[in-house]
Image (cartoon, grey):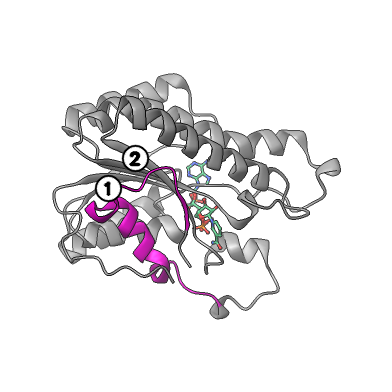
Amino acid sequence: MFDYQAPSQLLKGKTIMVTGAGDGIGKAAALTYAEHGATVILLGRTTKKLEAVYDAIEAKGYPQAAIVPLNLDGASEHEYRELANTLTSEFDQLDGVLHNASLLGERCDLQHYDIRLFEQVMRVNVTSQLALTQALMPLLKKSPAASIIFTSSGVGRTAKAKWGAYAISKFATEAMMQLFANELAESQPNIRANAINPGATKTAMRAAAYPNEDPNSLPSATDIMPLYLYLMGKDSLTINGQSLNAQ
Ligand SMILES: NC(=O)c1ccc[n+]([C@@H]2O[C@H](COP(=O)([O-])OP(=O)(O)OC[C@H]3O[C@@H](n4cnc5c(N)ncnc54)[C@H](OP(=O)(O)O)[C@@H]3O)[C@@H](O)[C@H]2O)c1
């Protein structure tokens, strides 16, 4: 596991958005960031799941969260603009974004991959990250030290057979992270961008990809949080353009 011991109030006073915050790794990240003092903006497509995370944060007495229901599959430019307007009216700045929401798609040979599904995976896993980052940029620019974290995968570095659109989307995610990191280093050095490869983690997505695996042989989403904290907090201020392993 990535070796980092976060101070208990590492993220005190920070406002952080987490996409796909209703389940799996995003849910664990939202709870962990709130536990470390952040106001967390929970973005996802299933409002009930977001409400459950919101309630869990409230029950623990962490800073009150905010819920943003948004389906990243085909959200319009208008919806992203509206989202930016709403957040601007409620928050002075945004100190971090964890791009975590993703679709697995189909596990099959690329020559047989359904084109519509391919486009859907690319929309959710790639295009939406760009649209959202663009919409949030004015608020990120107001932070003295903002962190954008993208979520990659082992198959975003080596495309293994039958990982289809998902692997291609994760290669694209790595490229998007590098582009933002290199460009912002010039124009906006208060914003850094990095990527996390979570590694095999016990979630619904992992179970769908490996139905014959014993989930209890895997680390939980909570176990892999040290890197998520490190990249969001002040101890990673000089880290930019890196792709790091949570395990
Ligand atoms: N688990 C692993 O072993 C592993 C390994 C490598 C990389 N990753 C990456 O880690 C990240 C989290 O994965 P996970 O394992 O936690 O997966 P997960 O349990 O399936 O969670 C994915 C989250 O993304 C949300 N989401 C999916 N489509 C969406 C859409 N159209 N609009 C808004 N939200 C949407 C889901 O919302 P709903 O709850 O509404 O479905 C869910 O909250 C992903 O980027 C994944 O590629 C995971």
Decide: marks 2, 1 in contact (CB < 8 A)? Answer: yes
Residue 99: percent from the left, percent from the top? 43, 44
Residue that mark 1 sits on: 237
Q: Residue 192, which numbered label?
A: 2
Give the quarter of the image for residue 172: top right
Q: Of the two numbered discs 2 and 1 on the same chain, state the one appearing first in sequence.
A: 2
> Do we see residue 52 in this rendering?
no
Residue range highlighted in magenta:
218-244
In x, y percent, where is residue 43? 37, 43
Mark 1 vs ligand 1: CB under 8 Å? no
> In this rendering, would 170 be left or right of 91?
right
Task: Give whichever of 95, 119 is nearer the camera.
Answer: 95
Identified by mark 1, the residue type is Leu
In percent of the image, x 59 and y 47: which residue is there?
A: 103
Which amino acid type corresponds to the residue marked 2 in the rendered image?
Answer: Arg
Q: CA distance from mark 2 to mark 1?
A: 8 Å
* Foreground pick, 129 / 180: 180
- Relative side of 54 to 165, left or right: left
Mark 2 closeness class: few <14, some 14–19, many ≥20 residues within 10 Å: many
Q: Is residue 90 magenta?
A: no
